[in-house]
Image (tube, rainbow, N blue to C red):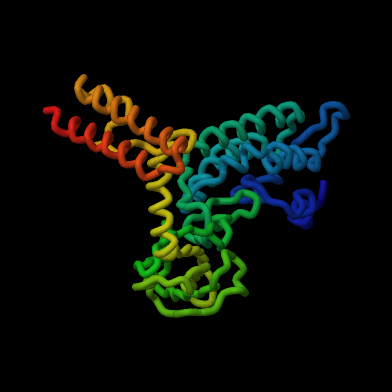
């Protein structure tokens, strides 16, 4: 065993540089008292080093212990109380007394299981709002570092697509779901035509505190990527990206006409009939017998006149006049049949 004057040095060497929930909340002097009487049953010798390795395995390397310690802000004090309630009674019981390593194994493992069960019931809400932004107030406790970690999200948010018609209004709001400091500064930047999140491609447009950027009449040269970056002091908190796609009005008109034309076609490229016009076979069925007779005679005379025209091409005038006269007579008959 190390001399009392070097006890703290021995403890620091044994535990190494990594921490755990155990080391965050249990004093090193208490750990020395706990491990003083650790006996290796196999060799029947007292071995403090083996006790510290046992503590490291049960608490330091136990992912369940680390996960149970990931509580919301302010609950680290409660973690300390829970672990002390498991360890300190053992310290008082084992202090300056010899106990086999099997006893240490059983009691320390039970302490870890009890801590996990109790700590897992503490509030897990961290206040982190995905997917982006530096959120210092939405931190969770980290047993590995013994401190609160910020929400581990990137500064850059996904691009939001905005489709607008030419000459219409465009509005972009630099809003986030988490709390912002009071001393924010907002910088708007623009990258013409391209869809990008490369910061070096943007040029500054305006700076101030206004998180709303409005374009009263959007033109084609407004198409491109917009970047809204929020600062607090000199620290960037979040970067929001927007891509505005502008549709020209002429193209829009052509698109509307094309949609109307496509809707008017039946499968196979046939046009739909007009709402007030009956298809040919329905029109024929609606005629009276007399009209049907007149229409049949008219078509017969038309075919005969075409035959005569070809046969007596040398005397076209006479043939045509008779044919036309007969057709006119039949048309007059059909129109006055009622």
The answer to whether residue 83 is left or right of residue 126 is right
**Residue 232 showing in the rendered view:** no
Q: 133 or 91, which lies in front? A: 133
How far across and how far down the image is residue 330, in percent? Answer: 23, 32
How far across and how far down the image is residue 138, in percent? Answer: 48, 55
Q: 286 or 151, which lies in front? A: 286
The answer to whether residue 299 is left or right of residue 63 is left
Report the label total. Answer: 0
> Within the image, what quadrant is residue 288 found in?
top left
Residue at horizontal 44 percent and vertical 76 percent from the top: 185
How far across and how far down the image is residue 284, in percent? Answer: 28, 25
**Residue 169 showing in the rendered view:** yes
> Within the image, what quadrant is residue 186 found in?
bottom left
Q: 67 or 178, which lies in front? A: 178
Residue at horizontal 75 percent and vertical 49 percent from the top: 15
How far across and how far down the image is residue 240, in percent? Answer: 50, 64
Q: Quadrant of the C terminus?
A: top left
The correct choice, above or below, for 319 with respect to 257 in the image is above
Q: 239 or 300, which lies in front? A: 300
The answer to whether residue 92 is left or right of residue 129 is right
Residue at horizontal 57 percent and vertical 64 percent from the top: 195
The correct choice, above or below, for 55 with respect to 144 in the image is above
Residue at horizontal 50 percent and vertical 70 percent from the top: 229
């Amino acid at each position: 065993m190390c001399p009392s004057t070097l006890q703290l040095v021995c403890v620091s060497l044994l535990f190494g540089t990594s921490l755990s929930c155990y080391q965050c909340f249990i004093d090193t002097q208490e750990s020395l008292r706990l491990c003083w009487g650790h006996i290796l049953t196999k060799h029947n010798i007292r071995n403090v080093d083996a006790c510290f390795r046992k503590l490291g395995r049960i608490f330091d390397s136990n992912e369940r212990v680390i996960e149970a310690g990931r509580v919301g802000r302010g609950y680290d004090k409660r973690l300390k109380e829970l672990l002390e309630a498991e360890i300190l009674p053992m310290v008082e019981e084992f202090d300056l007394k010899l106990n086999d390593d099997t006893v240490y194994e059983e009691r320390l493992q039970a302490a870890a299981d009890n801590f996990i069960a109790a700590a897992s019931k503490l509030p897990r809400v961290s206040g982190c709002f995905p997917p982006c932004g530096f959120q210092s107030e939405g931190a969770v406790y980290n047993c590995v570092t013994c401190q609160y970690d910020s929400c581990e999200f990137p500064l850059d948010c996904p691009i939001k697509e905005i489709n607008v018609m030419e000459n219409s209004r465009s509005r972009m709001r630099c809003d986030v779901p988490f709390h912002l400091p009071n001393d924010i500064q907002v910088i708007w930047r623009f990258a013409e035509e391209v869809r990008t999140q490369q910061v070096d491609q943007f040029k500054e447009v305006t700076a101030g505190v206004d998180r709303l950027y409005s374009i009263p009449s959007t033109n084609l040269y407004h198409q491109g990527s917009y970047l809204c970056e929020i600062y607090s002091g000199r620290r960037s908190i979040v970067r929001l990206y927007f891509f505005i796609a502008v549709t020209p009005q002429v193209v829009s008109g052509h698109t509307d006409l094309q949609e109307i034309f496509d809707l008017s076609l039946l499968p196979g490229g046939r046009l739909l009939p007009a709402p007030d016009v009956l298809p040919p076979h329905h029109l024929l069925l609606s005629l009276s017998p007399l009209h049907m007779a007149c229409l049949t005679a008219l078509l017969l005379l038309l075919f005969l006149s075409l035959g005569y025209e070809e046969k007596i091409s040398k005397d076209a005038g006479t043939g045509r006049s008779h044919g036309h006269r007969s057709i006119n007579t039949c048309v007059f008959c059909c129109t006055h049949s009622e």
